[in-house]
Amino acid sequence: MSPDHAPGYRAGRTLPLRVEVVRQLRRRRTMVIGGVLAAMPLIVLAAFQVAGTPNRADRTTFIELATSSGPNFAATMLFMGTGFMLVIPVALFCGDTVASEASWSSLRYLLAAPVPRARLLARKFAVGLLFSAVAVLLLPLVGLGVGTAAYGWGDLKLPAGASLTAGEALPRLAVAVVFVFLSEVVIAALAFWLSTATDAPLGAVGGAVFASIITGVLDAITALGDLRAWLPAHWQYAWADALQPQLEWGGMVQGVSLSLSYAVVLLALAFRGFARKDVVS
Protein backbone atom coordinates (compact mmCIF):
# COMPACT_ATOMS: atom_id res chain seq x y z
CA MET A 1 0.00 0.00 0.00
CA SER A 2 1.26 3.44 -0.86
CA PRO A 3 2.22 5.46 2.25
CA ASP A 4 -0.04 8.23 0.94
CA HIS A 5 -2.99 5.88 1.43
CA ALA A 6 -1.87 4.20 4.65
CA PRO A 7 -4.45 4.22 7.46
CA GLY A 8 -4.10 7.31 9.63
CA TYR A 9 -1.60 9.03 7.33
CA ARG A 10 -2.09 12.77 6.96
CA ALA A 11 0.47 14.72 4.97
CA GLY A 12 -0.51 17.87 6.88
CA ARG A 13 0.58 16.29 10.15
CA THR A 14 4.11 15.39 9.10
CA LEU A 15 7.08 17.38 10.40
CA PRO A 16 5.19 19.68 12.80
CA LEU A 17 6.59 23.20 12.92
CA ARG A 18 7.27 23.01 16.66
CA VAL A 19 9.37 19.87 16.15
CA GLU A 20 11.58 21.59 13.59
CA VAL A 21 11.87 24.67 15.83
CA VAL A 22 13.03 22.56 18.77
CA ARG A 23 15.49 20.64 16.59
CA GLN A 24 17.08 23.82 15.27
CA LEU A 25 17.03 25.48 18.69
CA ARG A 26 19.04 22.64 20.21
CA ARG A 27 21.78 22.83 17.62
CA ARG A 28 25.12 24.19 18.80
CA ARG A 29 25.40 26.72 15.97
CA THR A 30 22.12 28.32 17.08
CA MET A 31 23.45 28.82 20.59
CA VAL A 32 26.79 30.13 19.32
CA ILE A 33 25.18 32.66 16.98
CA GLY A 34 22.80 33.80 19.72
CA GLY A 35 25.68 34.18 22.17
CA VAL A 36 27.81 36.15 19.72
CA LEU A 37 24.99 38.55 18.82
CA ALA A 38 24.10 39.07 22.48
CA ALA A 39 27.76 39.69 23.34
CA MET A 40 28.44 42.20 20.56
CA PRO A 41 26.83 45.20 22.34
CA LEU A 42 28.93 44.45 25.42
CA ILE A 43 32.07 44.27 23.28
CA VAL A 44 31.23 47.60 21.61
CA LEU A 45 30.46 49.13 25.01
CA ALA A 46 33.82 47.97 26.31
CA ALA A 47 35.50 49.51 23.26
CA PHE A 48 33.83 52.85 23.96
CA GLN A 49 34.85 52.66 27.61
CA VAL A 50 38.46 52.11 26.62
CA ALA A 51 38.53 54.65 23.79
CA GLY A 52 36.49 57.30 25.57
CA THR A 53 33.45 59.32 24.52
CA PRO A 54 33.62 60.84 21.01
CA ASN A 55 34.02 64.62 20.77
CA ARG A 56 30.56 66.19 20.78
CA ALA A 57 31.53 68.59 18.00
CA ASP A 58 32.38 65.66 15.71
CA ARG A 59 29.22 63.62 16.24
CA THR A 60 28.01 63.31 12.67
CA THR A 61 27.42 59.54 12.35
CA PHE A 62 25.45 56.95 14.30
CA ILE A 63 28.68 55.48 15.67
CA GLU A 64 29.87 58.86 16.96
CA LEU A 65 26.43 59.40 18.54
CA ALA A 66 26.33 55.95 20.15
CA THR A 67 27.06 57.20 23.67
CA SER A 68 24.26 59.80 23.63
CA SER A 69 21.51 57.47 24.91
CA GLY A 70 20.17 53.95 24.92
CA PRO A 71 18.21 54.45 21.67
CA ASN A 72 21.35 55.84 20.04
CA PHE A 73 23.35 52.79 21.11
CA ALA A 74 20.64 50.52 19.65
CA ALA A 75 20.76 52.44 16.35
CA THR A 76 24.53 52.08 16.33
CA MET A 77 24.31 48.30 16.77
CA LEU A 78 21.85 48.11 13.88
CA PHE A 79 24.21 50.23 11.77
CA MET A 80 27.14 47.94 12.59
CA GLY A 81 25.11 44.81 11.88
CA THR A 82 23.77 45.91 8.52
CA GLY A 83 25.75 44.70 5.54
CA PHE A 84 27.70 41.82 7.07
CA MET A 85 27.24 40.94 10.74
CA LEU A 86 23.55 40.12 10.30
CA VAL A 87 24.06 38.51 6.88
CA ILE A 88 25.98 35.63 8.46
CA PRO A 89 23.25 34.34 10.83
CA VAL A 90 20.58 34.74 8.12
CA ALA A 91 22.70 32.78 5.63
CA LEU A 92 23.52 30.20 8.30
CA PHE A 93 19.97 29.59 9.51
CA CYS A 94 18.58 29.29 5.97
CA GLY A 95 21.57 27.80 4.15
CA ASP A 96 22.45 25.12 6.68
CA THR A 97 18.98 23.70 7.12
CA VAL A 98 18.51 21.29 4.17
CA ALA A 99 22.16 20.72 3.27
CA SER A 100 22.97 19.69 6.85
CA GLU A 101 20.31 16.96 6.69
CA ALA A 102 21.90 15.71 3.47
CA SER A 103 25.40 15.79 4.97
CA TRP A 104 24.16 13.73 7.95
CA SER A 105 22.46 11.26 5.55
CA SER A 106 19.15 11.92 7.32
CA LEU A 107 17.36 13.73 4.49
CA ARG A 108 16.21 10.56 2.77
CA TYR A 109 14.78 9.26 6.06
CA LEU A 110 12.75 12.44 6.50
CA LEU A 111 11.33 11.99 3.02
CA ALA A 112 10.66 8.32 3.73
CA ALA A 113 8.59 9.24 6.80
CA PRO A 114 6.98 10.24 4.37
CA VAL A 115 7.14 14.04 4.48
CA PRO A 116 6.07 15.64 1.18
CA ARG A 117 9.01 17.47 -0.37
CA ALA A 118 7.22 20.79 -0.67
CA ARG A 119 6.13 20.60 2.97
CA LEU A 120 9.67 19.74 4.07
CA LEU A 121 11.06 22.80 2.30
CA ALA A 122 8.27 25.07 3.53
CA ARG A 123 8.85 23.99 7.13
CA LYS A 124 12.63 24.32 6.85
CA PHE A 125 12.48 27.78 5.28
CA ALA A 126 9.83 29.04 7.71
CA VAL A 127 11.94 28.02 10.70
CA GLY A 128 15.05 29.49 9.07
CA LEU A 129 13.24 32.81 8.62
CA LEU A 130 12.00 32.67 12.21
CA PHE A 131 15.50 32.27 13.62
CA SER A 132 16.80 34.91 11.20
CA ALA A 133 14.18 37.37 12.45
CA VAL A 134 15.17 36.69 16.05
CA ALA A 135 18.83 37.25 15.15
CA VAL A 136 18.08 40.58 13.46
CA LEU A 137 16.00 41.69 16.45
CA LEU A 138 18.43 40.45 19.09
CA LEU A 139 21.33 42.76 18.19
CA PRO A 140 19.53 46.14 18.54
CA LEU A 141 17.35 44.88 21.38
CA VAL A 142 20.32 43.90 23.54
CA GLY A 143 22.00 47.11 22.37
CA LEU A 144 19.03 49.10 23.67
CA GLY A 145 19.28 47.45 27.07
CA VAL A 146 23.05 47.76 27.32
CA GLY A 147 23.04 51.34 26.04
CA THR A 148 20.29 52.41 28.42
CA ALA A 149 22.13 50.89 31.36
CA ALA A 150 25.39 52.60 30.36
CA TYR A 151 24.21 55.95 28.95
CA GLY A 152 20.68 56.39 30.22
CA TRP A 153 17.30 56.70 28.58
CA GLY A 154 16.91 59.74 26.37
CA ASP A 155 16.26 61.22 22.97
CA LEU A 156 17.62 59.69 19.80
CA LYS A 157 20.21 62.14 18.47
CA LEU A 158 20.39 62.20 14.67
CA PRO A 159 23.54 62.80 12.57
CA ALA A 160 21.85 65.77 10.88
CA GLY A 161 21.64 67.56 14.22
CA ALA A 162 17.95 66.98 14.99
CA SER A 163 16.60 64.48 17.50
CA LEU A 164 13.61 62.25 18.16
CA THR A 165 12.07 61.81 21.57
CA ALA A 166 12.42 58.36 23.10
CA GLY A 167 8.70 57.80 22.54
CA GLU A 168 9.10 58.56 18.83
CA ALA A 169 12.39 56.69 18.51
CA LEU A 170 11.17 53.24 19.59
CA PRO A 171 8.55 52.75 16.84
CA ARG A 172 10.99 54.21 14.31
CA LEU A 173 13.65 51.73 15.43
CA ALA A 174 11.07 48.96 15.11
CA VAL A 175 10.40 50.02 11.50
CA ALA A 176 14.15 50.00 10.84
CA VAL A 177 14.54 46.48 12.27
CA VAL A 178 11.63 45.16 10.19
CA PHE A 179 13.17 46.69 7.07
CA VAL A 180 16.58 45.14 7.79
CA PHE A 181 14.95 41.72 8.18
CA LEU A 182 12.91 42.04 4.97
CA SER A 183 15.95 43.28 3.06
CA GLU A 184 17.81 40.14 4.18
CA VAL A 185 15.10 37.81 2.86
CA VAL A 186 16.87 37.71 -0.50
CA ILE A 187 19.99 36.38 1.25
CA ALA A 188 17.85 33.85 3.10
CA ALA A 189 16.26 32.68 -0.15
CA LEU A 190 19.62 32.45 -1.94
CA ALA A 191 21.15 30.45 0.91
CA PHE A 192 18.10 28.19 0.99
CA TRP A 193 18.23 27.56 -2.76
CA LEU A 194 21.91 26.66 -2.51
CA SER A 195 21.08 24.42 0.46
CA THR A 196 18.72 22.38 -1.71
CA ALA A 197 21.31 22.11 -4.48
CA THR A 198 24.29 20.90 -2.45
CA ASP A 199 25.09 18.47 0.35
CA ALA A 200 27.72 20.85 1.77
CA PRO A 201 26.24 23.27 4.34
CA LEU A 202 29.33 25.50 4.27
CA GLY A 203 28.99 25.78 0.51
CA ALA A 204 25.42 27.05 0.78
CA VAL A 205 26.18 29.46 3.62
CA GLY A 206 29.44 30.65 2.10
CA GLY A 207 27.86 31.11 -1.32
CA ALA A 208 25.18 33.40 0.08
CA VAL A 209 27.67 35.43 2.12
CA PHE A 210 29.98 35.72 -0.87
CA ALA A 211 27.11 36.93 -3.06
CA SER A 212 26.29 39.56 -0.45
CA ILE A 213 29.90 40.77 -0.45
CA ILE A 214 30.03 40.88 -4.26
CA THR A 215 26.82 42.92 -4.53
CA GLY A 216 28.19 45.31 -1.92
CA VAL A 217 31.39 45.76 -3.92
CA LEU A 218 29.45 46.30 -7.14
CA ASP A 219 27.24 48.87 -5.44
CA ALA A 220 30.35 50.86 -4.56
CA ILE A 221 31.22 51.19 -8.26
CA THR A 222 29.52 54.48 -9.12
CA ALA A 223 30.28 53.96 -12.82
CA LEU A 224 27.44 51.42 -12.88
CA GLY A 225 25.03 54.32 -12.45
CA ASP A 226 21.35 53.40 -12.25
CA LEU A 227 22.17 49.69 -12.55
CA ARG A 228 23.13 49.75 -8.88
CA ALA A 229 19.47 50.23 -8.00
CA TRP A 230 18.92 46.59 -9.03
CA LEU A 231 21.38 45.37 -6.40
CA PRO A 232 19.88 44.48 -3.00
CA ALA A 233 22.97 45.94 -1.31
CA HIS A 234 22.12 49.36 -2.76
CA TRP A 235 19.18 49.69 -0.37
CA GLN A 236 20.53 47.98 2.74
CA TYR A 237 21.00 51.22 4.68
CA ALA A 238 17.66 52.70 3.62
CA TRP A 239 16.42 51.95 7.15
CA ALA A 240 18.13 55.19 8.19
CA ASP A 241 15.24 56.99 6.48
CA ALA A 242 13.04 55.75 9.32
CA LEU A 243 15.18 57.71 11.77
CA GLN A 244 14.77 61.09 10.10
CA PRO A 245 12.63 63.90 11.53
CA GLN A 246 10.20 63.17 8.69
CA LEU A 247 9.95 59.44 8.03
CA GLU A 248 10.76 58.62 4.39
CA TRP A 249 9.32 55.42 2.92
CA GLY A 250 10.61 55.58 -0.67
CA GLY A 251 13.97 53.89 -0.29
CA MET A 252 12.66 51.26 2.11
CA VAL A 253 9.75 50.33 -0.17
CA GLN A 254 12.10 49.93 -3.13
CA GLY A 255 14.57 47.89 -1.08
CA VAL A 256 11.90 45.54 0.29
CA SER A 257 10.24 45.15 -3.13
CA LEU A 258 13.55 44.21 -4.74
CA SER A 259 14.48 41.79 -1.97
CA LEU A 260 11.12 40.00 -2.00
CA SER A 261 11.02 39.86 -5.82
CA TYR A 262 14.42 38.15 -5.98
CA ALA A 263 13.42 35.89 -3.09
CA VAL A 264 10.30 34.65 -4.88
CA VAL A 265 12.38 33.65 -7.92
CA LEU A 266 15.04 31.93 -5.82
CA LEU A 267 12.45 30.02 -3.77
CA ALA A 268 10.73 28.89 -6.97
CA LEU A 269 14.05 27.53 -8.18
CA ALA A 270 14.59 25.79 -4.83
CA PHE A 271 11.18 24.09 -4.81
CA ARG A 272 11.35 23.17 -8.50
CA GLY A 273 14.86 21.76 -8.28
CA PHE A 274 14.26 19.83 -5.06
CA ALA A 275 11.04 18.30 -6.41
CA ARG A 276 13.08 16.68 -9.20
CA LYS A 277 16.18 15.92 -7.21
CA ASP A 278 17.30 12.34 -6.67
CA VAL A 279 17.89 12.34 -2.90
CA VAL A 280 20.35 9.62 -1.97
CA SER A 281 21.86 11.14 1.19
Image (tube, rainbow, N blue to C red):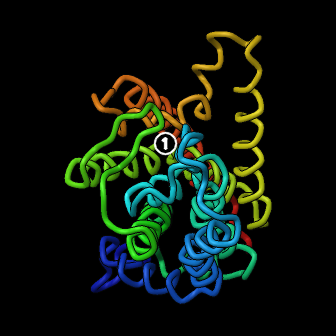
Which image quarter: residue 170? Answer: bottom left
Q: Residue at x 35, y 49 (%)?
A: 156
> At which x and y percent is residue 66?
51, 56
Query: Where, by quadrant of the figure, is residue 206 drawn?
Result: bottom right
The residue located at (68%, 74%) in the rendering is 100
User: Which residue is found at the position 22% from the left and 47% from the top?
Assistant: 168
Frontmost residue, 11 versus 238: 238
Looking at the picture, tell me which residue is in the foreground, 255 or 121: 255
Identify which residue, 39 or 28, lies in the foreground: 39
Q: Amino acid at mark 1?
A: Ser
Q: How far from the left and from the top, in percent, is residue 188?
A: 56, 52
Relative placement, left or right, of 240 versus 229 is: left
Answer yes or no: is residue 32 visible: yes
Quadrant location of the C terminus in the rendered image: bottom right
Mark 1, residue position: 183
Q: Is residue 118 above or below residue 238?
A: below
Residue 274: percent from left, percent from top: 61, 55
Residue at 64% from the left image edge and 53% from the top image edge: 191
Relative depth, front residue between 112 and 44:
44
